[in-house]
Amino acid sequence: MTAENPVEPVIRALQVLEALNRKPASSLGEMHAVTGLPKPTLVRLLGTLIAAGYATRISSQAGYRITGHVLALSSGLRFIDRIVDAAVPAMSEFTRDHAWPLALAKVRDGVVALLHSTGSQSPFSFERVGYNMTYQLMYTAMGQAHLAFCDGEERKRLIRDLLPDPKLELLGLRTVQSIDAHLAAVRRRGYAVTLTSRNLKLLGLAIPVRQGRQVHACLVLRFPRSVMTPEQAAERYLEPLNATARAIVKTLVAQDRVT
Amino acid sequence: MTAENPVEPVIRALQVLEALNRKPASSLGEMHAVTGLPKPTLVRLLGTLIAAGYATRISSQAGYRITGHVLALSSGLRFIDRIVDAAVPAMSEFTRDHAWPLALAKVRDGVVALLHSTGSQSPFSFERVGYNMTYQLMYTAMGQAHLAFCDGEERKRLIRDLLPDPKLELLGLRTVQSIDAHLAAVRRRGYAVTLTSRNLKLLGLAIPVRQGRQVHACLVLRFPRSVMTPEQAAERYLEPLNATARAIVKTLVAQDRVT
DNA sequence: CAACTGATTCCGTATTACGGAATCCGGTAG
DNA sequence: CTACCGGATTCCGTAATACGGAATCAGTTG
């Protein structure tokens, strides 16, 4: 029932504003040629943009141009948003092809923050998705993937802030050395798995989304432990997951070229 | 007769988009609180923004966020536009106070490009303003002001590209040394004047708009030579002109703090 | 000065956006 | 498991409004 009924004047006005962005200045005739909108309509919409402060009239012949106020329309965009934008199509494709839900997460301020999930598109829709929900670093596959593949300095800092933790000790990770060794193993095999003492129903298999050295985010495949072992999951899905990560980075780079 | 009749849905939609920019994500209720618009209207406008690609829905509870596509609404903004935005009010004030028309120009690719003029607001409305019209560097007061106050390296380069010019030789500026000396004099007295062999009706008195070392643009006061000499013009208007330049830079800096 | 190109305004009409009220949905408490 | 509740979503009759063809105006060119 999301049959869209877009508000037309809004669509048109944004079209006009985009057109204004493509040239330092545009006359009415140029705008007419570029947008295909009738001139009276353009005058009305440009007048509106001017009244709202996004554009200004230079002169009758020179036409119109944007003003600094347009920054208010994009100043809130964070790099994270661009990662998510780039990731959504690739993640949806993965879930369409392999049925399993994927999540995208990023480490920030020492915790893992969930950015996006295809849970709602998967037939196996366990667990509700908590947008911006945060998790501890080591317990989760996503956190381990980040720790394993991020810069050494950052890893050192994150582990230090983590360490006095009785739960980790129960898992045999008492010292920096033991954690480092564990992460080195993760790095070697190319994926991380949820740390669990025993009775967790759901496991995660995570990989980093990297551009060069930089770990932009992590992808995690979620599955019930009753269905397959982590090793079986890796056998089947590690390569498709890595392909998804590569596609995300590629889209991100393509965006940069345009902007 | 420019009594504005802004197109309402457009105003509202841009208001909504600005509000979305202020938070990483906003639920419908938050948007309602912030914008004061009725919820059905918000749903319609947000739906429109989503259809146009500027926003996306995260989830029913988490709400909406902007996408990378918003960059298309501001990517065309150049620093020059921001200078002009900052300059227009100050320049208008000058013309209101002193009646004379002011112009703002910037050196680019070895020529002076006109960015803005208050000609249309001045009672002495000689000469039509040619937006983006370009002029040679040395003949004009604006060009000299830029040359005199810009970085030494840049000055050297610009003069080299200028030099084999018979007209300049007629004015006694045959060598790099003579030009340098002339510009040093300009720098000393703080303003530049149109170079003229004899019968030009209009003169210009120009000063730089500087931020630290950087010459962002030049302001020029235009007046008929029959009314006053350049020295008299400087006597009366140099200080107000410099005050205008300072106001422009101040506005520019204030903008930076916000963005 | 005439002719033309392009910007601007007018205004009757049909469409469209509007938003109060009803409904739905998901989370929570009992 | 059910009842409840607050917020999200949809409906739909109405009024307002955006629309754009045609007329007018302004600036430029030959």
Image: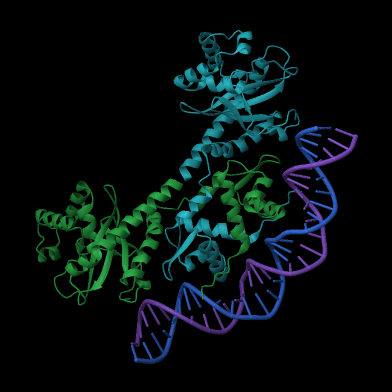
Chain colours: A green, B cyan, C purple, D blue
Answer above or below: position of A212 versus B140: below
Q: Position of residue A146 (x, y in %)?
A: 24, 56
User: Residue sitting at 51 percent across and 12 percent down?
Assistant: B180
Name above or below for residue A83 compared with residue B219.
Answer: below
In this picture, residue B47 sits left or right of residue A221: right
**Can you say whether A82 is above or below A233 in the image?**
above
Do we see residue B241 in this rendering?
yes
Picture residue at 51% right of the left edge, 11% below the top: B176
Expressed as whole percent of the image width and height from the top left, the position of residue A2 reads 51, 73
Residue A161: x %, y % from top left: 19, 54
Q: Residue at x 14, y 73 (%)?
A: A198
What count of labels does the image hold?
0
Q: Is residue D3 above or below residue B240?
A: below
The answer to which quarter of the image holds residue A193 is bottom left
**Residue A163 visible in the snapshot:** no
Q: As rendered, which of C26 and A35 lies closer to the eye?
A: A35
The residue drawn where x is 58% and y is 51% is: A17
